[in-house]
């Protein structure tokens, strides 16, 4: 018995290592590429040849030729995603609160209306928006991306928050009032601390969705004024014809990937609970 | 969709009663006393509050999602180039064109292969990953983070990164294949290998989500159930098949819907890696819609294909919801 269980343990450990390699290897290989010099790119070796490791790829996109292309995209992505996330979370919190607290016919219809949006193909929405934005001057502006990002993030935010709010023991509020707290105090002291983790989780998920959008980003922008990072990365390929942009692209990809990986590491638990809420019913 | 716009009308009626301050005489209110009972609101007050809280959301979604969707349906009946001032109504001609176009069978085939491979493969690999991560060994916490991380990365970045990995001359896959004495397939120029490449990358990026959801479901499987089975002499494979797998049913349905919806709409990886090529070998319906609309500028035709894709998404969702009924809380 002990024999087989040790063997099992070893087998599972090997499986875990395989999983780690599978997930990490591509990223590691790009990280290595991003430090290679142009002449070393074609060496076929995993690591940069000894003595030739260079940070020139990073310099090129952060302070060099490609700076304008990359840094403005980074600024656009951060600004647009943060604003869209903030608005989406505020609106979704209000809506989910109403869904959790108020009871009347038609509630389900509203919830369905909001959630049905998530099965609409984004690509169907983008042409009419493109047309409208050109007419009213929102094409290639921050607001022109913030609005579609709201319709991307609102449904899942409402859904996630409604799932969180359903679990809050709302009686606490009344209990606090019985103990002499005012309505506002009861809400702030008893309910807000319980609701905050859910709101925070939702914000992280919404941020990732906005940060990673590509269809709107590439279709509704045309210049550095609003073009977000994923769209800029896609344009990077054609930026320099004479020098292979391989190193610069891998450096850019690493730079936009690092903050996301850091967020995942820091907020692992919140992300997991956000992605799984509503998906699995005990 | 019509019912949505009804909402304000319905609430508008009762709101007029706010004029006189006597307790509203709606029949549902009843003779309930008025103490601090927060939940027992009169209907009109609940409506007003609800309108205040949910109104902005609904308005945003109706104006910027429902309305464009309907507009797109309308565009699909036009012969119209994007940005052009002239549009000619052509009825269902765009649809007829798509169904008779010689490239359409290939596009359907590519879409089917891509979708089935990514959804089916994703579920199988995701479940296997979840089973590994469900062991309480040292390192599985880190492994879980690492597996989920690609899911939140930008698809464009992932696609570009993997493009180097697949490089037939100095990519990592080529080096690995050389180790076992094989030549690298021409991932960039052979339509079938290119499709395989895009599928592998899509799976790598998205399988973490499936694993995560399965992992959560596995952790809610009662341990004593599995232990009881093993005491009764069931092998672990047997107890997995007869106990764990059936319990995962609802989760599997949930994942089938969500991954199918995202797979049919996947765009970023294809755009970053192959741009639909070579020779249309990776042009899915989704990619065709983008190409026709934003590169060829044929907005009417593109909208018609988008409508067909939307119909497919609707059909898939309804069929699955019908089948699953109340088993999944979606």
Image: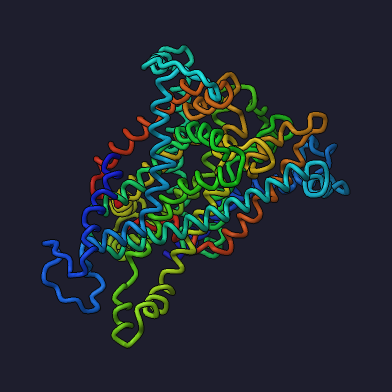
Q: Is residue B236 above or below residue A65?
A: below
Q: Is residue A249 above or below residue A181?
A: above
Q: Is residue B127 above or below residue B75?
A: below
The image position of residue A193, as x and y in percent, is 44, 74
Left or right relative to A208: residue A228: right
Q: Is residue B147 above or below residue B293?
A: below
| Residue B165 visible in the picture | no
| Residue B18 visible in the picture | yes
Residue A236 placement: quadrant: top right
* Observer-nearest of A269 and A51: A269
The image position of residue A71, as x and y in percent, is 73, 48
Residue A93 placement: quadrant: bottom left
State the residue at coordinates (23%, 45%).
B325
The image position of residue B226, as x and y in percent, is 32, 60
Which residue is at the far front? B19
Q: Quadrant of the N terminus of chain B?
A: top left
State the residue at coordinates (58%, 53%).
A20
Which residue is at the far bottom? A179
State the residue at coordinates (50%, 18%).
B86
* Observer-nearest of A110 and B52: B52
Count of picture labels: 0
State the residue at coordinates (43%, 35%).
B68
The image position of residue A74, as x and y in percent, is 68, 49
How does the figure colour the protein chain or chains? rainbow
Left or right relative to B325: residue B111: right
């Amino acid at each position: 018995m002990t024999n087989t269980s040790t063997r099992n343990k070893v087998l599972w450990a090997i499986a875990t290592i395989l999983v780690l390699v599978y997930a990490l290897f591509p990223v590691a290989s790009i990280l290595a590429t991003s430090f290679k010099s142009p002449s070393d790119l074609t060496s076929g070796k995993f690591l940069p040849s000894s003595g030739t490791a260079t940070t020139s790829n990073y310099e090129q996109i952060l302070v060099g030729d490609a700076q304008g292309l990359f840094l403005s995209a980074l600024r656009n992505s951060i600004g647009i995603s943060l604003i869209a996330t903030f608005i989406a979370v505020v609106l979704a919190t209000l809506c989910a609160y109403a869904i959790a607290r108020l009871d009347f016919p038609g509630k389900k219809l509203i919830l369905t209306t909001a959630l049905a949006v998530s099965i609409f193909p984004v690509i169907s929405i983008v042409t009419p928006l493109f047309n409208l934005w050109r007419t009213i001057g929102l094409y290639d502006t921050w607001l022109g991306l913030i609005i579609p990002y709201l319709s991307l993030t609102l449904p899942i935010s409402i859904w996630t928050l409604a799932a969180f709010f359903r679990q809050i023991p709302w009686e606490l509020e009344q209990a606090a009032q019985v103990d002499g707290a005012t309505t506002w105090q009861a809400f702030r002291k008893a309910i807000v601390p319980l609701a905050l983790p859910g709101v925070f989780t939702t914000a992280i998920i919404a941020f990732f969705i906005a940060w990673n959008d590509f269809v709107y980003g590439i279709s509704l922008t045309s210049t550095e004024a609003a073009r977000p990072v994923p769209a800029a990365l896609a344009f990077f390929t054609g930026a320099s014809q004479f020098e292979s942009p391989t190193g610069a692209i891998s450096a850019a990809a690493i730079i936009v990937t690092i903050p996301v990986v850091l967020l995942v590491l820091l907020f692992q638990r919140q992300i997991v609970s956000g992605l799984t809420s509503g998906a699995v019913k005990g | 969709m019509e019912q949505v716009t009804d909402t304000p009308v319905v609430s508008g009626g009762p709101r007029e009663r706010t004029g006189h301050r006597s307790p509203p005489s709606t029949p549902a209110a009843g003779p309930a006393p008025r103490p601090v009972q927060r939940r027992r609101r009169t209907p009109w007050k609940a409506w007003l509050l609800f309108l205040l809280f949910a109104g902005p959301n609904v308005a945003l979604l109706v104006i910027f999602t429902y309305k464009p969707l309907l507009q797109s349906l309308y565009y699909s009946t036009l012969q119209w180039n994007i940005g052009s001032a002239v549009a000619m109504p052509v009825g269902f001609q765009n649809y007829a064109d798509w169904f008779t176009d010689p490239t359409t069978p290939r596009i359907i085939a590519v879409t089917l292969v891509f979708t089935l491979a990514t959804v089916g493969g994703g579920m199988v690999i995701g479940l296997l990953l979840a089973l590994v991560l469900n062991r309480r060994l040292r390192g599985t916490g880190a492994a879980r983070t690492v597996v989920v991380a690609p899911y939140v990365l930008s698809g464009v970045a992932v696609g570009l990164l993997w493009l180097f990995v697949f490089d037939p001359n100095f990519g990592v896959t080529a080096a690995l294949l050389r180790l076992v004495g094989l030549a690298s397939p021409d991932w960039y120029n052979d339509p079938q290998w290119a499709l395989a490449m895009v599928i592998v990358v899509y799976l790598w990026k998205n399988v973490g989500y499936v694993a995560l959801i399965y992992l959560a479901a596995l952790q809610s499987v009662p341990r004593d159930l599995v232990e009881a089975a093993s005491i009764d002499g069931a092998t672990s494979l047997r107890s997995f098949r007869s106990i764990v797998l059936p319990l995962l049913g609802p989760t599997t349905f949930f994942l089938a819907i969500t991954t199918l919806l995202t797979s049919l709409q996947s765009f970023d990886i294809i755009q970053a890696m192959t741009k639909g090529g070579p020779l249309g070998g990776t042009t899915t319906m989704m990619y065709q819609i983008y190409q026709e609309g934003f590169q060829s500028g044929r907005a009417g035709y593109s909208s018609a294909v988008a409508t067909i894709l939307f119909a497919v998404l609707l059909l898939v969702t309804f069929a699955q919801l019908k089948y699953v009924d109340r088993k999944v809380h979606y």
